[in-house]
Amino acid sequence: MNAFVAYSIPIQGLKFGMHRFNFKIDSVFFSHFEGSPIKDGNLHFDLQLDKRADMLVLDFVLSGTVEAECDRCTATIDLPLEAERQLIVKYGESEGDEEDEVVFIGRETSDFNVAKYLYEFTVLALPITNTYDCQSEPHPPCNFEVLKYLSNNADEVKTDSVWDKLKGINDN
């Protein structure tokens, strides 16, 4: 059985107009993608589909968290993610072709599987650095020993700066 069958939208039977779908994705979902940068998460996708005579317009709204290692203190954190993406699906003869945010399918296609796009949009929503304002939480997940070490090292660097030593180079 296809692991992504739950992410298929039956487009053949849908009437023209707006339709809503909701998807939850977690560690089981991410385990099906080899080499995924995300191993675990608790994400919710709200999908609004506008079926038109010549195309489908899919608006994805992502919210939730993924498990990541904090780049500041190395603690395991639930990194918040939010994103909005749009995908346009057009009917055409070149089924399977993609151009940026446009996908082509045949008119006889009965369903459209969005699993691939849920995964891609989640990965694209990942920030460059895995940090967030965790200090506002009642119990921050921080590794305070690492933060203390970094804080002490920063103080040492400030007092023993290479630039301070270079200032006296012209005194000779």
Image (cartoon, helix red, strand yellow):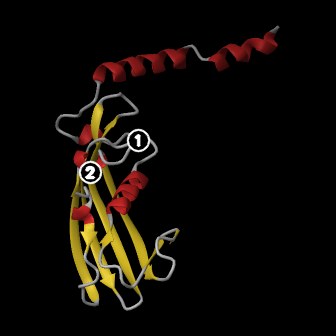
What kind of residue is marked 1?
Answer: Gly
Callouts 2 and 1 close, C-beta under 8 Å: no
Q: Is residue 92 above or below residue 78?
A: below
Q: Residue at x 24, y 32 (%)?
A: 141
**In the rendered image, which residue does mark 2 sit on?**
29
The C terminus, quarter of image: top right
Residue nearer the viewer, 90 or 123: 90
Q: Is residue 83 visible?
A: no
The image shows residue 13 at horizontal and vertical percentages of 23, 85
The image shows residue 103 at horizontal and vertical percentages of 46, 73
In the rendered structure, the answer to whether residue 110 lies left or right of residue 37 reads left
What kind of residue is marked 2?
Answer: Phe
Q: Earlier in the sequence, mark 2 or mark 1?
A: 2
Residue nearer the viewer, 158 or 50: 50
Q: Is residue 29 above or below residue 97?
A: above
**Residue at disc 2, secondary structure:** helix
